[in-house]
Image (tube, helix red, strand yellow):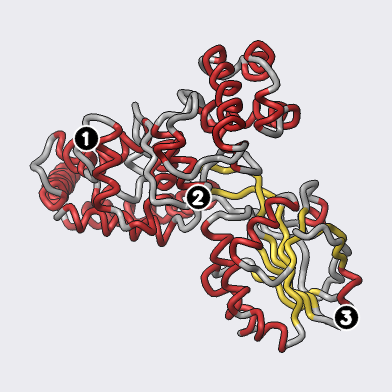
Amino acid sequence: MTLKERYSSIINYFRTNVPIAETELHYTNPFELLVAVILSAQCTDKRINQVTPKLFKDFPTAESLAASDSDTIFNYIRSVSYPNNKAKHLVNMANMLLKDYHSNIPSEINELVKLPGVGRKTANVVASVIYHKPAMAVDTHVFRVSNRLGLTKAKTPLQSEQQLIKHIPKQYVATAHHWLILHGRYTCLARQPKCETCALTSWCQYFQTKIINKNAPHSLSSKKLIMDKSTTINKKETIKKVSNTKETKAKTEASVKKTTIQKEPKKIAQKAENKFVAHSTSIKIGNKAPDFSAKNQNGETISLNDFKGKNIVLYFYPKDNTPGCTLEACSLKDEYQYLTKQNYIVLGVSADDEKMHKKFAEKYELPFSLLADTNLTIIKAYDVWGKKQFMGKIFDGIIRTTFIIDEKGTISHIITDVKTKEHGKQILGL
């Protein structure tokens, strides 16, 4: 397999199976992301997400953070790694933002790394997540996974970054960082990688040379051949030991068949028990649509009663500015004129606030309202909050779902298998 084929196969797998990949740090604006990433150095995202809500509430801007001092900030972040240094970095970073950048987060890597506490990895994260630049942030997970897969032969994070940037198409670089980091966090673990459940083993150098080839020649086919031969020999020896008579063989085969039949249902039942099933709304077609009222990206209050006599596309999505949600919104924008001709009103709902909605809507010129449901009132009324799975991790979140409400206020269609790239056409085809 050539290096080009390896990259192509792995990227195609992630594109197909993990179309949505994003940071697990919680933030609502570029300043909060910058603070969270600085804090996340050598610390888990889970810990950072426990610390930042109070910190962001009391110090929501660079101005408020710069007016504080490191001793005060230390008390907010004392449970993270290296709290003394990080407290100093945050205060100094805020002061530099005020003095040199007028509180705006720089978009260029060479400017970002000038900020206290911002290394190359942090700068790449901010540049890719906020400004969608083709920047590859290499942390311990990305470094380990890319080397194991055979995508890189790097001795340093910088070498890894340079090699990945060279071979990954620009449009996938930013997302590839999240693909690799999430794969390393939940599957390709440092000490005990979960190779038995990994879908990338066909292209993984580590698996082929360290796992399969421990006691066999260096190829999957050789390993399979040896296992097949071993199995055949064992079967022959077993049959020979049991009996040489036709009668005994027949009894043995019948016994084996009976045992297999008895065991199969147990295996099937066990697999069914272990299979994760994501939450699905309890609302049914024909139900009266739950009433709702919330502010959109322009601060206008939007309610169900405003659209009597109209068909409503009420779509719930996880988060603004994420790949899948962006594709879905743009698909609806592309078909908006045709949807309006069919008497449709489009309304998007997520837990993002009005400011995030406004930036998202302006960036992609969305012609419809995005409702800010920060308290999850509408989300829970339509029962689209529940257990979901991503990269092997099970957590609570918004289940991507679209409800079509007819002119009488009744649910006429429910779409749970949302095709983000062509969701507009999906609705028009109902």
Q: Is residue 163 above or below residue 369?
A: above
- Dividing the picture into quadrants, the one containing residue 183 is top left
Question: Which residue is at 84% across, 69% downward?
Answer: 289
Q: Is residue 235 left or right of residue 357?
A: left
Foreground: disc 1 or disc 2:
2
The circle drawn on residue 154 is: 1
Residue type highlighted by circle 3 = Lys
Mark 1–mark 2 CB contact (< 8 Å): no
SS at circle 2: loop
Q: Which numbered disc flags the more N-terminal residue, 2 or 3?
A: 2
Count residues near mark 3 (Cα–Cα under 10 Å), then give few for <14, some for 14-19, many for 20+.
Answer: some
SS at circle 1: loop
Residue type highlighted by circle 2 = Tyr
Q: Which residue is mark 2?
A: 131
Q: CA distance from mark 1 to mark 2?
A: 27 Å
Q: Is residue 28 above or below residue 401?
A: above
Question: Which residue is at 52% across, 14% downward?
Answer: 85
- Dividing the picture into quadrants, the one containing residue 2 is bottom left
Q: CA distance from mark 2 to mark 3?
A: 43 Å
Q: Where in the figure is residue 128, as x and y percent of width and height?
A: 46, 47
Q: Which residue is mark 3?
A: 408
Task: Spot the residue most to the front.
Answer: 99
Count residues near mark 2 (Cα–Cα under 10 Å), then give few for <14, some for 14-19, many for 20+.
Answer: some
**Residue 364 visible, this angle:** yes
Q: Which numbered disc flags the more N-terminal residue, 1 or 2?
A: 2
Between 2 and 365, the one nearer to me in the picture:
365
